Amino acid sequence: MQLNGNTILITGGTSGIGLALAKRFSDLGNQILVCGTNVKKLEEIQKTYPKWGTYLRDISKADEREKLFQETTKDFPELNVLFNNAGIQRYPKLNELEPWTDLGKEIDVNLGAPIHLSMLFAKHLFAKKNAVILNTTSGLSHIPLAYAPVYSATKAALHSFTLTLRFQFRNQPIEVIEVSPPMVDTDLGIPNTHTAGLNLDVYADSVIEGLKKGDLEITTGFSTVTANVSREQKNEIFLSMNLARSTSN
């Protein structure tokens, strides 16, 4: 990925990994567009980074995704990088019925949105120089956390989708890159649940280094381990990780 001169749309770009990378991309000389649902955070970004484009859109909804595509490509026709970064992590108990709207939104944000947005933007991006689609998956794509079953499943599916997207687009002038973080000190929709994770700035710097090297799958720490271990080791890590969580609770 060329690291300067791009116009980059980042979903979930108002906080956490998205915002940390938005700042770094901006410092490298890129036009930044961020999308989110928090009005106050978008207003703060507008004040702090007046040259950034800001979009109040709920990407869990198909019509909002379509509007985001229409607005961003109209306002910034040179847009050449789509960064599907937004994510929600929840801890539903699968033996307890809850409103499907809650669980469904997690699926829509984590998986439905990246698939739909990639398809919406595909032909637009094919016509741009240095075009890229980045998808944020997780170390849990390969070894699930049983206490975050939907999050883990959606990230595994997004990893699979990213591989097939790269294959289908192999003859097009576009890169498809997977960003696979370990646990990072961010909210992921639930404040104060990831404070034991990797420092956000350390992680964001590692992503930039991976992009500089031309990596198509950028892993760090735990996500490097889970992406490369044997099946037997995966089973061992799955049990130890989830049994440890069970004991701590």
Image (cartoon, helix red, strand yellow):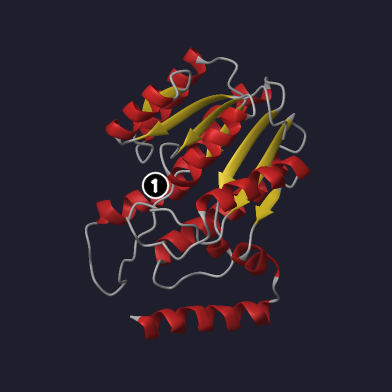
Apparent side of residue 196 relative to residue 162 in the rendered image (left or right): left
Rendered residue at 70%/45% (across/down): 209
Instruction: Identify the image quadrant of the C terminus.
Output: bottom left
Nearer to me, 70 or 180: 180
Q: How many marks?
A: 1
Nearer to me, 211 or 158: 211
Coordinates of residue 223 in the picture (x, y in percent) = 61, 63
Rendered residue at 48%/18% (across/down): 51
Rendered residue at 60%/40% (across/down): 134
Residue carrying label 1 = 108
Asked if one can make out residue 118 in the rendered structure from this viewpoint, the answer is no
- What residue type is disc 1 on? Asp
Coordinates of residue 86 in the picture (x, y in percent) = 45, 44
Asked if one can make out residue 96 in the rendered structure from this viewpoint, the answer is yes
Apparent side of residue 189 relative to residue 23 in the rendered image (left or right): left
Badge 1 density bin: few <14, some 14–19, many ≥20, Cα 10 Å:
many
Give the secondary structure at mark 1: helix
| Location of residue 48 with respect to 218 vertically, above or below | above
Nearer to me, 214 or 209: 209
Coordinates of residue 222 in the picture (x, y in percent) = 60, 66
| Location of residue 168 with respect to 79 vertically, above or below | below
Nearer to me, 79 or 107: 79
Coordinates of residue 9 in the picture (x, y in percent) = 52, 29
Instruction: Identify the image quadrant of the N terminus.
Output: top right
